[in-house]
Amino acid sequence: MIEKLIEYSARNRVVVLAIFALITAWGIWAVYRTPVDAIPDLSDNQVIVFTDYPGRSPQVVEDQVTYPLVSNLQGLPRVKAVRASSAFGFSMIYVIFEDKADIYWARTRVLERLNYASSLLPAGVTPTLGPDGTGVGHVYWYTIEGKGYTLEQLRTLQDWFVRYQLNTVPGVAEVASIGGFVREYQIDLDPHKLFAYRVTAGQVAEAVKRANNDTGGRLLEQSDAEFLIRGRGYVQSPADLENIVVGTGMGGTPIYVKNLGTVQTGGAIRRGLLDLNGEGEAVGGIVVMRYGENAKEVIDRVKEKIAALEKGLPPGVKIVTAYDRSDLIERSIDTLRSALTEMSIVVTLVVLVFLLHFRSSLVVVLTLPIAMLAAFITMKHLGITSNIMSLGGIAIAIGELVDAGVVMVENCYRRLSELPDEERDERRLEVIIDASKQVGPAIFSSMLVIILSFVPIFLLEGRGGKLFHPLAFTKTFAMVFAAVIAVTLVPVLSYYFLRGKMPPEESNPVSRFFIAAYSPVLRWCLRWKKTVILLNIVALAVAVPVFMKMGSEFMPPLDEGSLLYMPVTLPNVSITEAKRIIQVQDAIIKSHPEVEYVLGKVGRAETSTDPAPVSMFESIIILKPKDKWRPGITKNDIISELDARLQIPGVRNGWTQPIINRIDMLSTGVRTTLGLKIFGNDLNVLRQLSLQAEEIIKAVPGAADVVAERVTGGSYIDIEIDREAAARYGVAVEDIQETIGTALGGETLTTAVEGRNRFPIRIRYLRDYRDSIPAIQRILVSGMGGTQVPLSQVTRLKVSTGAPELASEGGLLRSIVFLNVRGRDMGAVMTDAREALEKNLKMPPGYYYSWAGQWEDQIKVRKRLQILLPIGLVIIFVILYFTFRSGIEALMVMLSVPFALVGGVFLVALLGYNMSVAVWVGFIALYGVAVETGVVMVVYLHEALDRRLLAGPVTERDIYEAAFEGAVLRLRPKLMTVATSLIGLIPIMWATGTGSDVMKPIAAPMIGGMFSSTIHVLIMTPVIFVLMKVRDLRKGRLTHSGMTH
């Protein structure tokens, strides 16, 4: 089939050129239309259910909202897990679906279940779905700044102008507000005046609700025109609220709201704030990107919208970028783009040096961009973003993309150069067809081996699969097109370009040099075959302990170019104290010489994608360009220096990066690299176990930022109702609860409508009557007959501690011990930590723990590869068997795989890399390349031997000479395939930009393995070939290989 395709292409050159011209144009279009991002989206396929329940404690939220919803959502189809969190005033539930479930199908299923589950919730409580964004959707942060404007004014501008305008940008799922104060109308009642006027807070609330509304009276026709009738009753100012009549006093005198307290505008209770550089509070927003969108394009559209909006902002107000993902995207793409350019140039030079014929090298070079462009076509139509990993797939394949073309062109060149000049033009087409058929099928098979060697990567699941599937897809796409190009376009281009003076291989000084160096070595090895085999076995044996001593980790960390400082403090910290702490922290961070600026966040933004409590701080640290850093300083040095300066009592430091933190928090519930999840039913027991585990893990070398989640420690004032006393005073329990909710917590009564703006109107007691326990005890509750009873007479007040937040998973309460790994490999830290916990942490009945975070991903990938790698090797063996029609020869070629491991292991160990998924991907890619080189060698060995078999009976000496001839005289194509693959990867190793830290561990085993596998193929393969054929000769089984030469 391959031979027929080669001949058809060579004889229908115009058709082939037209097809590839179309593919090239299509590929250029795809390059500009493929979505761009920094890294693949690694977050889980999840739907967030957010329920607002203002003023309620975590336990109330858990009992009345979270538990009813979770118990109904757990039975949904294709759900992997349901995690929940109940915090002060809100509930968040994460429904994790299988990766293959369509996100909008999943949202529909959740919404259907919520339609029923909502009936189980308290009146007025409505669960909502989070935005259709992902864990990495926070692509752009901004602040709104303006001298002379209050935080309340800036927040109003953000909430009712900027936010809604940015929401209209295509690709934006949500714009979340953070910082400043939400403006509200505040009615603060004086309980003494309420008592004097014999009015209850409930009556005031009802009067306010009735006095804030617009209505319509349909139409009035008059003088041939119709008039719309409007009843204008919206509250427009504090004066409107003050003059609302609540009732009448003695003599029919109206009782106004202003007679019962004060009315003003002010800031609502908040659970988050924003700080810039430690200089003071700021107001800002977070743009959340919609699922599946092009991050770079969305950010560019947001910036365009902001530029348009600034013309409509008040004088002196501006929108300033605080965090921009496109910087990371551009740096990542630039790194890969530079590497791809350098690699293309290097490959071109290699081909030119070996052939010393510009037109021949041009044939090979032209196939490279076509294969790359064709890969972009499939990326565009399969929805694969252009990111570090997808472009990395093309990068590690560049040398391999030209291998088939190199062998084809070199063979055509050799065959044409052997012809006399006068016959070359006349026989050009036939010679090219014959030369292409000679190596085409075997080369196509070897390319197929490289393609299928990546099957294990396609079958990875979880975060490892999401990370490396784009790399596997793009590398495979490019290799498929390269294989097709080799047997279709290369013969056509060879016909047009292989012209002019064509010096034979013997006259090439590069070929002569390598042949002169290789010949005596091979002669010696063919003479001392057993010694050579023994030396190879020793090299393989030495590599085993080196491999066993290597550390392990899930993935080398991607340097995002910025830092996220994420400390936690005591769970009962007030937002005022949290503000003071973060401003001190941010000022210290800003003073560091490598820091450009810092944006600090306390608590959560107004979005269901942010579950942070007030006790959690997040400071995004934007670093200066590396050329402005002090000489010799590294990112780890910066972290160490900042960590030493940020030792604040009561604060536990934590260091990570913005993107990976979002992925970890929303995917696993763990905000650090690793986390120990402890499950059970009693919070106090969980607290004790977590603190014990924290102390145990702290003692493990390499464990950093170890802190146990404080599942207790929140401060409470419990108001317990004395039902007997309440009955004695004629006070209903409902009235007591209503008084607590209204007088202390404050109740949002209605909403003031001011044009496009909406402001809540809330009612509450004056601060002096609710700011201490004695004041709370004096609050009056209405009894039967209008009597007013102090709260202390019908309740018992006490101060207690409890859960600041309730987290659950799988139906059990959960606590987490957070930790990062620093200065040691993850595998070693985990081994020691697990042993220490097994020895020192005793779990009571009904409690257990499990590890989460990157270790969980690493274990999944390891178990998967243990199954998939042998399957991949079997697939390669089957292909080789059908190529050579011999199981023994297939095994001979397969021997290059373990010997390729030798060089790969030594180079990875030398460079200090840990065994990670990235390194394993490099080894898997190496398998295919090593086998390809072995296939080329065996093809030429058979060619030389078959010529002698056709000429007549052969002797053992003939087999030696055939092996020598096939190995030495055809050294150039073998070295060219190795050189293009090997040297093509070297630019990755000297790259320093963003993304290079992920690509280097992939390239390292490939480079080291190519050295050792090349030595094996050039030395061991001829030796084994001679031993096999001599044995066949002695047994009378030596026959022609059946290959076309």
Image: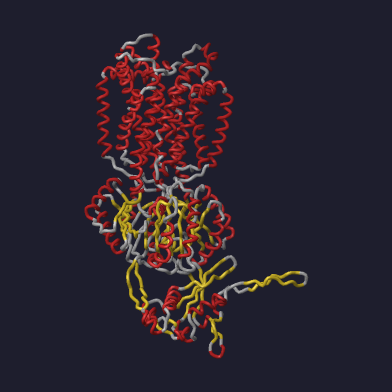
Q: Nearer the viewer, residue 87 or 238?
A: 87
Q: Residue at x 40, y 11 (%)?
A: 950
Q: Nearer the viewer, residue 574 or 744?
A: 744
- Residue 768 visible in this rendered orientation of the protein: no
Q: Residue at x 57, y 88 (%)?
A: 252
Q: Position of residue 486 (x, y in %)?
A: 48, 26
| Coloration of the structure image | secondary structure
In the figure, residue 516 lies in which quadrant? Answer: top left
Query: Considering only vertical position in the picture, is 973 above or below 157?
Result: above
Query: Considering only vertical position in the picture, is 1031 above or below 642?
Result: above
Disc count in the image?
Answer: 0
- Residue 731 visible in this rendered orientation of the protein: yes
Q: Position of residue 12 (x, y in %)?
A: 57, 23
Q: Position of residue 474 (x, y in %)?
A: 46, 37
Tell me the quadrant of the picture where the C terminus can be found. Answer: top left
Q: Position of residue 967 (x, y in %)?
A: 36, 19
Quick one: which residue is furthest to the top in this view? Answer: 952
Q: Is residue 653 left or right of residue 195?
A: left
Q: Is residue 416 left or right of residue 541?
A: right
